[in-house]
Image: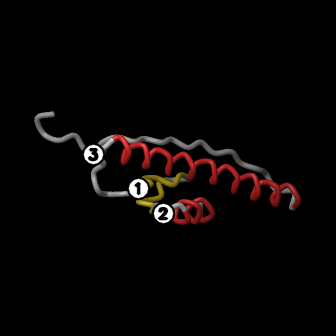
Amino acid sequence: MEAMAQVVMAHGGMVKQYVGDQVDGLVWRTIPRQTEAEIRSGAVAGVKCALAMGERLQQLNLGWVEQQLPTIAIRVGIYTGPMVREPGR
């Protein structure tokens, strides 16, 4: 989890919390995105981070194989929309 949190922070994000064995609540900007360009920018940042997390996990797994330890897999979900619905919308 520490390695994934480091990847998130390297991509300008922050870890909101850890829940069990997952890193939860990755947030890039708390400022609402209004334009298509701002929305696209957030989505691109999330995808780049997810790809980097996959690359980092491959490195970790190779090290674990050399140590005869089990390897793991991860899933990454990306959401680019409102976190809270505004009243009346």
Residue shown at 48%/42% (left/top)? 78
Residue 23 position, x and y percent, is: 51, 55
The crowding category of the residue bearing disc 3, from other C-alpha atoms within 10 Å (few below 14, some 14 to 19, many at least 20), is few
Q: Earlier in the sequence, mark 1 or mark 2?
A: 2
The crowding category of the residue bearing disc 1, from other C-alpha atoms within 10 Å (few below 14, some 14 to 19, many at least 20), is some
The one nearer the camera, 21 or 2, is: 2
Q: In the rendered image of this protein, does residue 47 appear above or below residue 9?
A: above
Residue 39 position, x and y percent, is: 37, 44
Residue shown at 39%/42% (left/top)? 80
The one nearer the camera, 17 or 9, is: 9
- Asked where in the image residue 56 lies, by quadrant, the reply is bottom right
Amino acid type at circle 2 is: Gly
- CA distance for labels 1 and 2: 9 Å
Q: Quadrant of the C terminus?
A: top left
**In the rendering, which numbered label is found on residue 34?**
3
Q: Earlier in the sequence, mark 3 or mark 2?
A: 2
The crowding category of the residue bearing disc 2, from other C-alpha atoms within 10 Å (few below 14, some 14 to 19, many at least 20), is some
- Under circle 3, the secondary element is loop
- CA distance for labels 1 and 3: 16 Å
Residue shown at 42%/41% (left/top)? 79
* Image-based side of 42 in relation to 74, left or right: left
Residue shown at 36%/57% (left/top)? 29
Residue 25 position, x and y percent, is: 42, 53
Q: Earlier in the sequence, mark 1 or mark 3?
A: 1
User: Residue at the top extreme?
Assistant: 89
Amino acid type at circle 3 is: Gln
In the picture of the structure, the residue carrying the numbered disc 1 is 27
In the picture of the structure, the residue carrying the numbered disc 2 is 12
- Under circle 1, the secondary element is strand
